[in-house]
Image: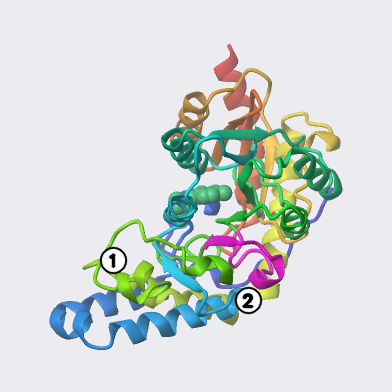
Amino acid sequence: MREPPPAIPGARLLFSLDPAVSYLNHGSFGAVPISVQRTQQRLRDEAESNPMKFFAQGLEDRVTHTRRHLAGFLGADPDGSALVGNVTTGVSLVLQSLRIGAGDEVLMTDHGYGAVALAVRRQCRRAGATARTVAVPLTATHAEVAARIRSALRPGRTKLLVIDQLTSPTAKAFPVRDVAAAAREHDIPVLVDAAHAPGMLPVDVSAIGADFWVGNLHKWAFAPRGTGLLAVAPPWRRRIDPLIVSWDQEKGFPHSVEFQGTLDPTAWLSAPAGLFVLRTLGVDQVRAHNAALAAFGQQIIGEALGCAPDDLPDPGDPHVSMRVVPLPAGLATTPPEAHGLRDHLADQLSVETAINAWGGRGYLRLSAQVYNRPDDYLRLAEHLPAFLRSLQR
Ligand SMILES: Cc1ncc(COP(=O)(O)O)c(C=O)c1O
């Protein structure tokens, strides 16, 4: 039996999570450390003490300073990146800026995030283009993933490839650097959906070599929700067209994207406090703890459900802090069923998880974060089999 990692003492006390709930779904919406919540509240208080001063004097410098800090952490060009509210926003921004035309196609994989696929489909529908999906087996190695995607590219026709750095329904790391290199051979632009990467994976955005890369800091980098970073390769920067036109439109990227009227910038400005927490705990220590705990959780819950070791997908990167366990056949095979089961499980067993339908099968996704303990997973392993049996009766 795999041993769980030693706990990081005191780390749980940094969060305001309900102690009665096993919170095994950091991946969906993150959890903001108390110190970061306080930082944001202090910034809101500052804004309310004199809104005119807060918004009209020096805000651009503060936003730029924050962006440089966050981009530096991620290895992105600080002046070729823009703060955005989230990955969803960054994806739509890129799709809008690309000017996809009739007869073009946008290529994605069948592991892509649902809302991203919807955005791609809408853009294609409007343009008379095609949204095409390449199937990637759950067990594919990095070389197989790269080969599949490479052979699905249609030079001249594929106007964008959207690829995840770490997938949401299947918790699978994709070899984004190799894939970007393959697409570059054919001059096909690549957008990396890196929603889960910041904080969890050691990221060097510039080394990936994608045309566009967008990640969330509000998942694994402990930032307040509403903190994303969009990095854009030099040739595209002048072509980035903000979704909303505001006063900084003429300044060009990144200011035209970052200034969107009277939006609350306090999440962005507080994000460095999230990185401070991560660094104080020790980035490497946090990553090692979380990845080992997720692997432990997958193993014991998988065993409890009668899965053979080969049935438990390996994420393909040692830093991944989310793992999936296949549910018994016939359960959670559609998104509504999966979400219903997730909510029912939360109500009945006081455990928050993600449950997704993928490829006609239901998958339970477990996250691990510094506030989780082996007991959280052991308790689920003890009660989940009977809970699922009660549904099948
Ligand atoms: C792979 C992936 N892409 C995109 C998103 C969207 O992130 P957001 O809702 O912050 O825009 C998520 C959210 O979980 C995700 O997992």
Residue corresponding to mark 2? 75
Image quadrant assignment for residue 284: bottom right
Residue corresponding to mark 1? 260
Q: Name the colour scheme.
A: rainbow
Q: Is residue 213 above or below residue 68?
A: above
Residue 322 image point, x, y percent: 65, 51
Residue 5 image point, x, y percent: 74, 62
Q: Earlier in the sequence, mark 1 or mark 2?
A: 2
Image quadrant assignment for residue 370: bottom right
Q: CB of mark 1 within 8 Å of CB of mark 2?
A: no
> Could you say which is closer to the camera, residue 231 or residue 341?
231
Tag 2: amino acid: Gly
Q: Is residue 340 above or below residue 379?
A: above
Residue at image coords 68%, 23%: 328
Does residue 19 show up? no
Q: Start and end of the magenta stretch?
A: 197-215
